[in-house]
Amino acid sequence: QVQLVESGGGLVQAGGSLRLSCAASGRTFASFAMGWFRRAPGKVREFVAAINWSGGTYYTASVKGRFTISRDNAKNTVYLQMTGLKPEDTAVYFCAADRSGSGDYYYSELPYDYWGQGTQVTVSS
């Protein structure tokens, strides 16, 4: 069983930055694909970014150029660096792990086997 724990959320003004972290338990982290999703108030959870086992990255259009996903396999941690934050980025952010590692269908929740509890990000205007 893999446990994922997110941290780094908070309240920030529009235009500001935050870095989210997701620490994973277990010894097979390096083989996982990792994703970030978010759920805004009153909306369904949506894909934000993903990184496969070899470092390939994927982003939803609305965050491309502002957010950067990265991973540190030595620390079993995946990061989401968020810059140029907008009020519409306000959401609970979740990290997720896909054991297959490929990152195929990264935009869908279906491939992900493990989920964190989420961390709140609030962007004020």
Image (spheres, rainbow, N blue to C red):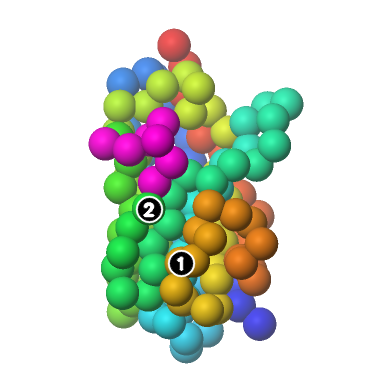
Residue at the spot x=46%, y=67% of the render? 103
Q: Regarding mark 1 in the picture, which secondary structure is present there?
A: loop
The answer to whether residue 6 shows anywhere in this view is no
Residue 121 percent location from the top left of the image: 51, 34
Q: Position of residue 3 (x, y in %)?
A: 61, 72
Tell which residue pokes out farthest to the left in this image: 65
**Mark number displayed over residue 58:** 2
* Three-letter residue code for mark 2: Tyr
Residue of label 1: 103
Q: Are marks 1 and 2 in contact (CB under 8 Å)?
A: yes
Neighbour tally class for label 2: few under 14, some 14-19, many 20 plus, Cα within 10 Å: some
Crowding at dot 1, Cα within 10 Å, few <14 / some 14-19 / many 20+, comes out as many
Q: Is residue 98 above or below residue 58?
A: below
Quarter of the image holding residue 50? bottom left
In this rendering, is residue 33 above or below 49?
below
Question: Could you say whether the residue bearing mark 2 is in a helix, strand or loop?
Answer: strand
Residue 45 visible somewhere in the drawing: yes
Residue displayed at 44% across by 11% down: 125
Q: Position of residue 84 (x, y in %)?
A: 30, 27
Query: Please, what is the three-letter code of the amino acid marked with disc 1?
Result: Gly
Q: Position of residue 54 (x, y in %)?
A: 31, 74
Task: Report the magenta residues as a range.
Answer: 59-65
Whether residue 114 sits left or right of residue 58 in the image: it is: right
Determine the residue positioned at 47% across, 19% down: 87
